[in-house]
Image (cartoon, rainbow, N blue to C red):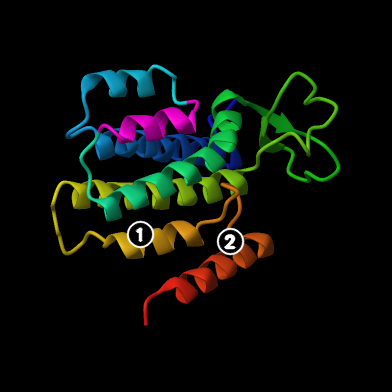
Amino acid sequence: MPAPQENDDTIQFVRAYGEALLEWARIEQHLFFCHRPKTHDGPRRVLFRQELQWPLRMIEAALQHATIEPTALEVIKAGIHKAVAYNALRNRIAHGGMIILHDDTTPDPAGRPLLAQGKDFLFHIESASITKDQLETARANFATLASILLDAWFYARGARHSRCKPPQECLALIDALPDEADSAKPSQKQLGRLRQRQSAQRKTRPR
């Protein structure tokens, strides 16, 4: 069998898979960095012994042992909540298996690569699988969240680098990220909740 060409769908699919997981690794690293500087070893070990299944109460408990500026801490907590929302897809990506689908919807004789899920994927291939487009969208959302968390870490350390976004801008970016990791834009339901929260915040601001 000849080696697949660089522009082959399978090569692009594998690249999208790898890039998505690399960006998720950056999220994990930056969450660790965010509370590492002044957190005792005990809470760190408690947090990361959980193999990043994101027990939110445990993460927030560990953060209570860190000395972090309140504005940066707010960004980190918002980032944790978004990471929790994204973790389900991350698990599906990490534990899925690539298959090459050949059916009436795939005119290409080489087939269409998919990331299949679970023991019953043969009976529900379309509904239980992840496509290359979903992987690329997830990679972009993971990358944005990782970058925001890195900015929060710099801010928590007292750095005010010109390329680092301030906390309020970071919070706005987290709010704008879709709640579904493989969505390119927020749902109408999410946008409605965001508008309600913004309206409530405006009402509570001192005049």
Crowding at dot 2, Cα within 10 Å, few <14 / some 14-19 / many 20+, comes out as: some
The reply, left or right, for residue 162 in relation to residue 30 is: left
User: Which badge, 2 or 1, is on the more N-terminal residue?
Assistant: 1
Q: Which amino acid type corresponds to the residue marked 1 in the rendered image?
A: Cys
Q: Is residue 112 magenta?
A: no
Q: Which residue is mark 1?
A: 170
Residue 34, image quadrant: top left
Is 58 magenta? The answer is yes
Range shown magenta: 53-65
**The quarter of the displayed image where residue 51 is located:** top left
Residue name at image x 42 percent, y 64 percent: 172
The residue tagged 2 is 185
As drawn, 13 above or below 155: above
Q: Nearer the viewer, mark 2 or mark 1?
A: 1
* Main secondary structure of the magenta stretch: helix
Q: Is residue 66 left or right of residue 91?
A: left
Q: Position of residue 154 (x, y in %)?
A: 20, 49
Front residue (pair 104, 132): 132
Q: Position of residue 133 (x, y in %)?
A: 60, 49
